[in-house]
Image (spheres, rainbow, N blue to C red):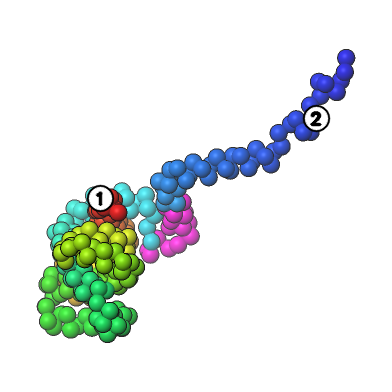
C-alpha cells in the first residue's frame, strides 16, 4: 500500500491565510450588499464607547450613559413645557426650511442661468455666506423680537446660502447644447425648467437641501440658546445650568430624531424626483 496516496500534501490542504481572505471577502461583500448593517454597527460601537466612558471614565456630573438617557425619555417628555417646546422648535425648523428652499431656488436659478449675474452677484453671496452670522443675531432680535419670527429668520439666513451655492453649481454643469436644442424645438421657459434644467441639477439641488437643513437647524437652535423663553434651545440651557446631563442628552436625542425625520423626507423626495433623470 502506498502511504503517500493516503497522506494529504501541503498543496491539498487549504491554507489558513486563504480561509481568512475568503472570510474577509465574504464579510466585505455582505456589508456592500447591506450598508444598513454597517451603519448599525458603527452606531452600536459609538453607543458602547459612550456607555463605557460615561460609567467609568468621565465624571457623571458632565455626561450620562446612553442606557440612562434612553430610559429617561419619558421623564423628559413629562417635564412641564417640553412637549410644547418640541412642537415650537419643529414648527420653526419646518417654516425656516421651506422658506430657505423657496428663496434658494429662485435666487440660485436667477444667478446661475445668467452669466452676468453669476459673475457680479456670486462673489457677494459667497462673502455673506462666509460671515459669522452669530455676530448679527442681536439685529434679528431688534427686527423680529424674541418670539418665533426671529428664530425662523435666523434659521433662513443659515439655510439659504448652501442651497443657492449648490444650485448655481448644478446649473453651471448643464450643457449649453441642451438648452439650445430645447429652445430650437419651441420649448417655453417652464418647459426648459421642468424637462431640462431641473432634472440635471437634481443631485446638487438635494445636496444643497441637506446642507440647508443642517444650517437651518443650527440657526434656529443658536437663536433659541441665546434669546428665547421657549423651544428646545431654552430647555437645553436650563438643563445645562441645572447640571442635569440625563435630561440634557434626552432632549438632544429627541432633537436628533427630529433631524433624522427631516433628512428622511428629503431622501425620499430625492428618490422620487431622481426618476426624471
- Name the main secondary structure of what is drawn in magenta: helix
Q: Which residue position holds label 1? A: 272
Who comes first in sequence, dot 2 or dot 1? 2
Horizontal arrangement in the rendering, residue 26 relative to residue 76 (left or right) = right
> Does 122 sit above or below residue 9?
below
Q: Which residues are magenta?
A: 45-62
Q: Which residue position holds label 2? A: 9
Q: Quadrant of residue 219?
A: bottom left
Measuring 30% from the left and 54% from the top, which residue is drawn there? 277
Residue 223: image tag: none
| SS class, disc 2 | loop
Q: Quadrant of residue 262?
A: bottom left
| SS class, disc 1 | helix
Q: Badge 1: few (under 14), some or many (20 or more) residues near its Cα, within 10 Å?
A: few
Q: CA distance from mark 2 to mark 1?
A: 59 Å
Q: Is residue 228 visible?
A: no
171 or 247: nearer the eye?
171
64 or 47: nearer the eye?
47
Q: Badge 2: few (under 14), some or many (20 or more) residues near its Cα, within 10 Å?
A: few
Picture coordinates of residue 40, whole percent (x, y)? 41, 47
Measuring 38% from the left and 64% from the top, which residue is drawn there? 62
Amino acid at each position: 500500500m502506498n502511504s503517500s496516496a493516503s497522506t494529504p500534501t501541503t498543496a491539498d490542504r487549504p491554507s489558513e491565510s486563504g480561509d481568512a481572505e475568503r472570510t474577509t471577502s465574504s464579510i466585505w461583500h455582505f456589508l456592500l450588499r447591506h450598508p444598513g448593517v454597517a451603519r448599525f454597527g458603527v452606531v452600536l460601537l459609538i453607543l458602547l464607547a459612550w456607555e463605557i466612558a460615561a460609567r467609568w471614565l468621565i465624571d457623571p456630573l458632565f455626561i450620562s450613559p446612553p442606557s440612562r438617557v434612553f430610559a429617561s425619555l419619558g421623564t423628559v417628555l413629562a417635564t412641564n413645557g417640553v412637549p410644547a417646546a418640541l412642537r415650537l422648535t419643529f414648527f420653526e425648523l419646518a417654516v425656516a426650511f421651506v422658506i430657505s428652499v423657496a428663496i434658494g431656488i429662485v435666487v440660485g436659478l436667477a444667478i446661475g442661468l445668467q452669466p452676468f449675474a453669476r459673475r457680479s452677484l456670486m462673489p457677494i453671496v459667497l462673502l455673506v455666506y462666509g460671515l459669522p452670522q452669530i455676530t448679527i443675531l442681536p439685529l434679528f432680535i431688534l427686527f423680529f423680537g424674541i418670539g418665533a419670527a426671529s428664530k425662523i429668520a435666523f434659521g433662513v439666513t443659515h439655510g439659504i446660502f448652501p442651497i443657492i451655492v449648490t444650485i448655481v453649481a448644478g446649473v453651471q454643469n448643464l450643457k449649453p447644447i441642451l438648452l439650445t436644442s430645447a429652445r430650437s424645438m419651441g420649448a417655453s421657459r417652464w418647459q426648459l425648467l421642468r424637462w431640462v434644467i431641473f432634472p440635471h441639477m437634481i443631485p446638487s439641488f438635494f445636496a444643497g437641501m441637506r446642507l440647508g437643513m443642517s444650517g437651518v437647524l443650527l440657526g434656529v437652535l443658536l437663536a433659541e440658546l441665546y434669546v428665547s423663553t421657549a423651544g428646545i434651545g431654552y430647555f437645553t440651557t436650563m438643563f445645562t445650568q441645572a447640571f442635569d446631563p440625563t435630561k440634557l442628552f434626552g432632549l438632544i436625542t429627541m432633537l436628533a430624531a427630529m433631524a433624522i425625520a427631516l433628512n428622511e423626507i428629503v431622501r425620499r423626495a430625492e428618490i422620487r424626483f431622481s426618476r426624471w433623470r
